[in-house]
Amino acid sequence: MRIAVDAMGGDYAPGAVIEGTAQALRDFPDIEIVLVGHLEKISFYLEKYRISSHPRLRLVHAEDVIEMGEPSTVALRSKKKSSMTIAASLVSDGEADAIVSAGHTGAAVAATKVIVRTLPGVERPAIAAIMPAAEGKFILVDAGANTDCKALHLAQFAVMGEAYSHLVFGIEKPKIGLLSVGGEDMKGNELTKETFKILSKMPINFVGNVEGHDVFARTADVIVCDGFVGNVLLKASESLAMATVHWIKNVFKKNAVRKTGAMLARNAFRDLKAIGDFEEYGGAPLLGLNAICVIGHGASSHKAVRNAIRVAGEFVKFGLNDRIVNGITEAGIAIDKQHAENKTNL
Amino acid sequence: MRIAVDAMGGDYAPGAVIEGTAQALRDFPDIEIVLVGHLEKISFYLEKYRISSHPRLRLVHAEDVIEMGEPSTVALRSKKKSSMTIAASLVSDGEADAIVSAGHTGAAVAATKVIVRTLPGVERPAIAAIMPAAEGKFILVDAGANTDCKALHLAQFAVMGEAYSHLVFGIEKPKIGLLSVGGEDMKGNELTKETFKILSKMPINFVGNVEGHDVFARTADVIVCDGFVGNVLLKASESLAMATVHWIKNVFKKNAVRKTGAMLARNAFRDLKAIGDFEEYGGAPLLGLNAICVIGHGASSHKAVRNAIRVAGEFVKFGLNDRIVNGITEAGIAIDKQHAENKTNL
C-alpha cells in the first residue's frame, strides 16, 4: 500500500508533516509513503527525523505550494506543479493508492475532482468529518466540499457516510439522519424535503430528520447535509468550543477559592480537552473519489498527520470505495456524469 | 402601551405565563396586558398570583390552543379560535400594540403573517435570536422563520437586525456580517454570493462574510443568514452546550480529588451556566411585522415571560418598526408584495 503525502500542506508544514510521516513509517510497516514537496525545503526535516534514506519512502519534488488564502480554481490553473496537484497525479497514474494533505481544502477538492475524478455514478465528492456527541461520536457529511447541492447528491453522501461508519467504526447498520429544522417529515427546506423522500426509499437505516437540537445527542451515526450547512455547523461548533474554553478560564480565575478548586481538578480539564481533540482521527476523508483522499485540519500536528496516514491506509485495506460504489448502485441513485453539470463550488 | 400575551403558549403554560404576567404588571407600570387564554384553565393561576382584578389586566377567552407538535398551517385552519390567532387579531384590530407568546414558533409566524401582516415593503418576517459570544453577544437573524430565502430577503433581515441592535443594545453602527463558509467575498453558496453584492451597496456597516469559525468570536454584532441555516446553528449550539455540561459532569465526578475541586469552585459553574442563560432577554422577536411580536423559547419560565413583555414594550417605545421601514426604503430593497410570492415555509 502506497500513500502520497503532501509535505507542504498545513500551517505547520513541512516540519509537522515530515515528523508525522516518520512516525507512520515507524508504526505502520505495511505502508509505503511517497512524500511530495519542495526537496530543498524538506531536506532539513528529513535529516532531523532520520528518514532521508528510509526504504519505504520515496521523494517527489514539487516546485509550488497552494497557500491557504488563495482561491482554489485560480491556484490550480497557475500552479500545475504544486505539491497537491502532483500528489493527485501520482494517484491517477497508479503510483499511489491514497493522498493525505493538511493543506487548502478547496484546492484539494478541486484538484482531486479534476485529476483523480469521481467514482462511477458519483458526481460530487464530499467531506466526512467526525464530531463528538454527548456519548460517542458521529459523522457529518458533507462538511464543506459542496456549497450548493441537489437531493441526489445528499443521497449519495448518505451512502458514503454509511460506508465510512460501517467499515471504520464497525457499526453494523449505521443510523443515517438528515439534518433539518424539525423532526417531522414535512419540516425542512426544499432540498431536505426532496432528499427525505429519496432516503426513505433507500436500503439504508434511515432514521429521518435530525434537528439542530439533537445533533450532539447522537440520535444518528451519520448526519447528512449540504456542504454549506455542514461547514457552518462544523466550524461554528469549533468556535463555540473555543468560546467555552474562554468562559471556563474566566469563571475559574475569579478568586483564590475557585483557583484552588481548578488546580485540584486540573486533570478534569485535561480530560475535557481530550473530548474535543480529534487529532486521533487524523483528518476528514474526501469521499466519492477514485482514490482515497484524507484532508487534515490546517493546524494538523505530527500526531494528526500520522493518524491521517493510518486512516488512509485503513480505507484502502477495507475497500471503502467498493462499498460506496455498490451502495450507490443498489440504491439506484447513480448520476450519469456525462449529462450532469460538473462545476466546482469551492 | 398594551401587550397581548398568549397565556396558553409554552411548555409551562399557563402557570409560568401568568406568573410572568403578574411580575410584569408589578414591575412595568406603563404596560397594560391583554391576557388571551382559556378562562376556566387560567382562573386558578390568576387567583394564585393575585391579578384576577388587576386594573391594567384585561382577559380575553380563547377556546383552543395550538399544540407544539401540530403542523402550523393545518393548526391555523382548524383552530381559528386559538390563543395565538386571537392575540394576533387583537393587534390587527388595534386593541394591542404587541404580542408575546412562548408557544409554537411556526404557528406564531404563520398566524402573524396572515393576520398582522408584514410591514410595507417587507415580504418575510424573520426571527432575531440573541446568542452569547466569547465576549458580549450577537444577534442571529433569521433564526428559523424562513427555510428557503432569496437574497433580497436576507438584505431585509440585515436591516431588521441592525434596527434591533441599535435601538435595544444601543450600538451606534452595528457591524453586520453575512454567515458563509469563508471570509473572502467570493466564498459562499449562490444565495450568499448574491446577498453579499446587495449588502455591499447598502448604507449599513457591512463587515463582509463571517465564517463558522468566527461566529462566537464576535466579529459582528448582527449575523445574517437564511432561516434553515440559522435554525440549525441556534439549535445545534444549544445541543453542544448541553453535551458540554454532560462532559463537564463526567470529568469532574471521576474521583474524590476532582469532586473536591468542583465543590470549591462550584460558583464558577454557576457563573458559567449564567452565560448561556438567555432568559434575561426574554425571547426572540419576530421582526418585519406590522406589530411587535416576541416569541419565547418553548421552555420559557416566568422570568422569561416577564422579560419578553419588557422587551416587547421597549420595541414599541423605541419605534423599532419605523426604523426598519426607513432602513428598507433608504437601502432601496423594498419588495413589491403584490408581485412577489407569499407562501409560508413553516
Image: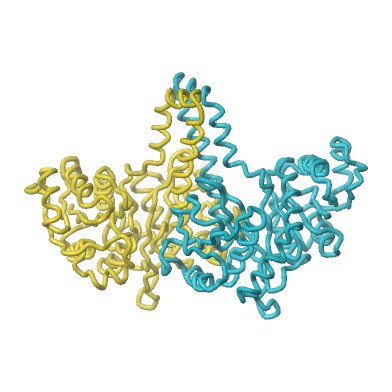
Chain colours: A cyan, B yellow
Camera-nearest residue between B289 and B212? B212
Q: Is residue B333 left or right of residue B168?
A: right
Residue B82: x and y, percent? 21, 64
Residue A78 visible, this angle: yes
Residue B211 visible, this angle: no
Q: Is residue A76 left or right of residue A60?
A: left
Residue A48: x and y, percent? 86, 35
Residue beneath the point at 54% across and 31% down:
A269
Residue beneath the point at 29% across and 68% down:
B117
Asked where in the image residue B336 lies, by quadrant, the reply is bottom left
Q: Is residue B128 left or right of residue B293?
A: right
When the figure is inspected, residue A17 is found, relative to residue B344, above or below; the finding is above
Q: Quadrant of the C terminus of chain B?
A: bottom left
Residue beneath the point at 30% across and 62% down:
B108
Residue B196: x and y, percent? 53, 61
Camera-nearest residue between B124 and A157? A157
Camera-nearest residue between B289 and B39? B39
Camera-nearest residue between A215 and A230? A215
When the figure is inspected, residue B221 is found, relative to residue B260, above or below; the finding is below
